[in-house]
Structures are given as structure tokens and as C-alpha cells.
Amino acid sequence: MGQGPSEARALSLLVVLSVLPLVLGLGNEVWYGDPSQYAEVARRIAVSGDWLHLFDNNGPNLNKPPLAMWGIALFVKLLGPTSEAIRLPALLFGVVMLIAVARIGTLLWSRSVGLCAAALLASSLAFQVMVGDPKVDMALTAMSACAVWMAFEARRRPWTIWLAWLFGGLGVLAKGPIGLVAPVAAVLPEAIRHQWGDAGPGTLRSRLWRLQPLGLLVAAAVVYPYVRATFEQFGAHGPSEFLFSQSFGRVLNQSEWHNDTTPLFFLHTGLWAFAPFVPALILELWRRGVALAKSRRLPWDESRVIWWWLGIPFVAISASSYKLPQYLFWLAPPAALIAARALSDGAPRALGWIWTGLGAVAAGALGVLLQVGFPPRAFAVTVAWIGAALAVTAGARALSRRLPGLARPAVLAVGSMLTVELFYWTYLYPTMMEFQPGAEWGELLRREDPAAPFVVYSGCEQSTAVSYYANRPAIELTPEQLAASVRRGEVKLAITEAQNLHALEEQGLVAERLGELPYYPTSVPRGAFLNARTRPETLTMQLLVRLRVAGP
């Protein structure tokens, strides 16, 4: 396979181009849901200086461990409560993950395979969403990838196995025990069959010792301060929830979290989450399945770690009582490595046509979405975006004929997604955020009452996005409580809805409207919202009002 510098440069450029839409979208507002909740927890960390005891607007927070929130808190200290402060940690975790994937591919096969895997991964919807809609999944994915990377490095430099345990511990701090269990489950099946990184099989004891099981103490030392903090806040329930209920409890059906999905949920989720490289992934799954059926044996192979890394967690999350698409995202690194390896064995011409067709379909989808969802201003924009998508797809196909080795199929895959992702993060996402005006409310609140200690809600749904951008916690008050606070001079501004104004008047308050903005009360852009005709049915109107007591 090709190893020339021109191939490496082309693949490296594809990685940069894939990340570009996310860089351009760093300043986009965040939804009111999980991303803003974690951002508000991080803002409180930055303000209080308490990095272990987590709080949000509802009090002590045990929803997720703190690693991703620590990253946001650091940037809040540097940049203030901005959108960039929320997304930059996810982007940096993503860059670390891409480096880890490229290095794993290099150690197992070649530099070209590693860079190809990184390019496919960076262009995938899973990667894009983990940065653009930042939760805790990118931190988990990056730490897991680094743990596997260090395990492979330990074949030549045994001391790096201690770093693998360290990254496993950080993975636990990202999203619970899965951050350690997944890398161990990936490496262990091959490591106990043959001495890790050695020509000889060795004894079972020597095989296990090669992995330095005492490294578990390193992971435990990383996790212990947070476990202790959860015990201080929640008693025994804190460590139990963190270490069992939110992970193993869901697989064993011993968690209060349940939703109505089937074990096949992640199969159809993978079709879009692993786009654009899912055709190559399916190709390699087919090839390996046929080879296994013929040979009926699994000889020892350290590169099979990638398959265990994908397969074992996939089975576990498919058995979980609660499933969300982002639970699959952190399996994108092994999936991209498998896809890149498939392409290194020769990409069938059909894959090129599939990616070309995907780019053409994406162009049409952009046009339909704009015409249905955002008329009448969208016609000229529609023509421009359709033309751009078709031009990029055609250009990628023409360029692929001139590129060497793995850069040829990779440019087709990346090209099929690039315009769509650029469109989403620079146009569609900001347009949709006009209906969740967190930053606008936050700026208005800071300007109209810079000294207020709280964002006050009365008679409408709270938004942690407003709380974060306003740089103050939010509280909810009944009309009676609000009237008492206004009379004591504690509250001047409140966010409410028009139907609640009468209740405020009954409490003797006069409300002066300072702003009125539409509010879309969910983090998922459903069909009814994306259709301009039905969108008004999904919106509520929120008011920012200045309050005073009625009378002379």
C-alpha cells in the first residue's frame, strides 16, 4: 500500500478539512438541554473553585462525572461564559482522539491507514455531533482511545501500560466505569491468549503481569477524590449511582432509567452515526464474517483488539435498559479503524459511487430542508448550498483520480459529508438557535440588571442556557413569591409567559416588557419544528419583564 509523503499530506489535509466546520461553529449557542446543563455546572465550578462537589440550578448534581465539565470550567475562567468555552474542550478532546486513532492505525498497519482512519472519523456524524452538541461523550471517547493507544505502545515500550491505566481512570471520570471497562475488554481477550507485545506465548501469569494489573490502583487513585466527594454529598447513594446504577445497572436492568427501544436500536443508529464510512465498515464486517465461516477459528491476533473494542461494548449497550444515540458515538474510533483497514485492502469501485450518490442525495436534502423549513428567504440560499454540495462532490470525485493510495477513497468519503456539515454548523444550527435564545436573554439580563444574583423564572420552563450565558444561577418563583421579592427590592427582572401576566397583576405587580422571544422547548429538532407550517405549534413565547409594585 502507498506510504508516500503526498499520500500522508493529502490524508492530513482531509482531517483538517473535516474539522473545519466545527471550528467555524464554535461560537454557536448551545441548546437548553444537556450541553447547557453541563456548562452551568462548569460555570459554578469556575466561580466557586470547588472542583469535586458539583451543583446546578436544582442543587447537588450527580448526573455525570466531572472530566468534561472541568475542561469547560477552565475555559470559562479564560473566556467567560461563552459558547467557545463550552465547545473548545470537546474540540481539544477530539483532536487528542484523532491523534490516538492515527497512532493506533500506524502501530497496527501503516501511517496511511492511521491517517485515513482519522480522516474518516473526523468527518463522521458521531464526531461532529460530539463537538458541535457537546456533552460528556467526547471526553470518554478520547480517554478510551488513548488507553487503547498506550496499550499498543506498551508492546514496544512496556512502561506505557501505566499510562493506559491512567487514561482508563480519566475515562471513568468522563462517564463512569465504561471508560475503564471498554479498553480492558478490548485488550484482554488477545492478551490472555498470548503474551502482550512478545513473540512467545508465555504463561498465563506472565501474560497477565504484562498488563500490569496493579495499574488498577492508578485508575482507582484518579477516581477516588470524586468518589469521596459524591459520598460527602449524597451518602452511599452517590458512589453507588456513579459506579453502578448509571452503567452496570442499566445493562442488568437494575436502574430506574428505561426507554422503549429494541436491542437493534444501535444497528440503525450506526447507519447514520458512522456516516460516511459505514459502507466500508459493512464491507469489512462481511469480509471477516465470510473468512470466519470458512476457517471456523480465531487465531491470536493483536489487531483483533479493534474488533473487541467495537464488539463487546456494542453488545453491552444493546442490552441496556436505556438507549440514546450518543451511547454509540464513543465506538466510532474502532469503527473508523476497521473501515480504514478495509480500504487499505482495496476499495471496490462501488464504494466510490456510493459516496458520490451520498453527496448528491445530501445536496437534494439540503434543498428540501431549506424550502420546507425556512422559506421565503431560503430560495437563493438553497440554490447556493445545493450548488456547493454538488460541486464538492464532483470535485472530490475528480480529485480522487489524481490522489495516491488511501487518499483516493478517503477524499470521496469526506467530500460526501463536508458540505452538509459546513451547512449544518454555519447556517442551519444558528438558524434553529433563534428559537432558543439563551445568549440573547443572557446578554439582555446582564445589561438591564448587572448586579442581580439570579435569573428569575415565573410560570414558564427554565433554561440552563440562559443561566449560563447570564452568568448567574436560575431560580423559579411563584407569583406570590415573586411579588414578595419585588417588594423587598430583591428582584427587578423575571422571565415569564404572556398567560402568566394576569397572575402577576393579581399580586399587585406591573410588568414592563423588555423583550419577547420564541422558545422551542426541546433539544431535538423534530419534524414538526423543521416544517415552517407546523413550527408555530411547537413554540412558546417567553417574555423578559421589568417588575414594580403597582400604585402611585
Image (cartoon, grey):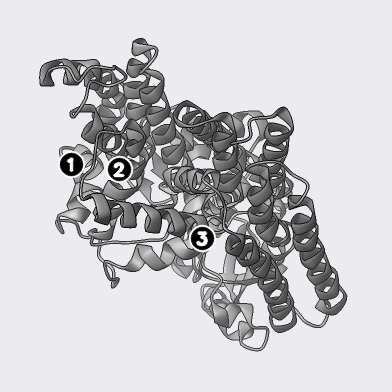
Task: Name above or below for residue 72 compared with residue 320.
Answer: above
The tag earlier along the polypeptide, 3 or 1, is 1
Q: Residues within 10 Å of mark 2 (few under 14, many from 20)?
A: many
Q: Is residue 510 left or right of residue 388?
A: left
Looking at the image, which residue is at 50% across and 64% down? 272
Q: Which residue is mark 3?
A: 279
Helix, strand or loop at disc 3?
helix
CA gap, disc 2 and disc 3: 20 Å
Q: Dots 2 and 3: beta carbons under 8 Å?
A: no
Question: Tag 2: residue type?
Answer: Trp
Q: Dots 1 and 2: beta carbons under 8 Å?
A: no
Q: Nearer the viewer, mark 1 or mark 2?
A: 2
Q: Which residue is mark 1?
A: 240
Looking at the image, which residue is at 72% across and 33% down? 9
Q: Residues within 10 Å of mark 3 (few under 14, many from 20)?
A: some
Q: Residues within 10 Å of mark 1 (few under 14, many from 20)?
A: some
Q: Nearer the viewer, residue 411 or 518?
A: 411
Task: Name above or below for residue 1 compared with residue 327.
Answer: above
Task: Answer with the quarter of the image where residue 298 lies.
Answer: top left
